[in-house]
Image: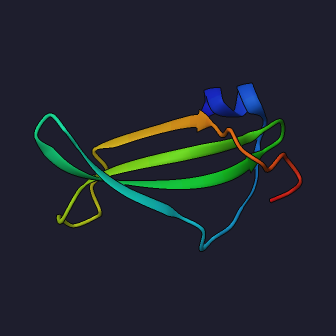
């Protein structure tokens, strides 16, 4: 997260109840992808959390942060 902050600025805002969920498979595992959009100083980012589907959602099996492509720009969240 230090690198994200250095690249795109500090975390400024996110909508607490806004999430996107999707499911998929990878290497034989059923997965649940949970995406949170957050505003940073320079751009909007997507935080992607990955869990094993139908298991307790307390253990993350994957995590990534990517720049969001879309309609909102910083300050419009």
- Image quadrant holding the N terminus, namely top right
Q: Which residue is the extreme one toward the front?
A: 71
Q: How is the image coloured?
A: rainbow
Q: Quadrant of residue 42?
A: top right
| Of 70 and 56, the residue lying toward us | 70
Q: In this image, 58 relative to 76: left or right?
A: left
Please determine whether, in this image, residue 27 is positioned above or below residue 73. above
Q: Which residue is the extreme one toward the bottom?
A: 17
At horizontal 42% and vertical 49% (from top left) the residue drawn is 49
Q: Quadrant of residue 68?
A: top right
At horizontal 10% and vertical 40% (from top left) the residue drawn is 28
Residue 70 in the image, given as x and y percentages of width and height: 71, 44
Please determine whether, in this image, residue 63 is positioned above or below residue 76. above
Q: How many marks?
A: 0
Q: In this image, 74 relative to 67: left or right?
A: right
Q: Which residue is the extreme one toward the right?
A: 75
Residue 43 in the image, given as x and y percentages of width and height: 78, 38
At horizontal 73% and vertical 27% (from top left) the residue drawn is 6
Residue 55 in the image, given as x and y percentages of width and height: 17, 64
At horizontal 75% and vertical 49% (from top left) the residue drawn is 39
- Image quadrant holding the C terminus, namely bottom right
| Of 16 and 23, the residue lying toward us | 23
Q: In this image, 35 relative to 71: left or right?
A: left
């Amino acid at each position: 997260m230090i690198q994200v902050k250095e690249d795109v600025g500090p975390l400024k805002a996110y909508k607490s109840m806004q999430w996107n969920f999707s499911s998929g498979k990878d290497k034989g595992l059923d997965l649940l992808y949970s995406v949170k959009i957050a505003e940073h100083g320079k751009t909007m980012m997507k935080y992607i959390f990955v869990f094993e589907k139908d298991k307790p959602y307390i253990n993350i099996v994957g995590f990534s942060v990517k720049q969001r492509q879309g309609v909102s720009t910083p300050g419009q969240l």
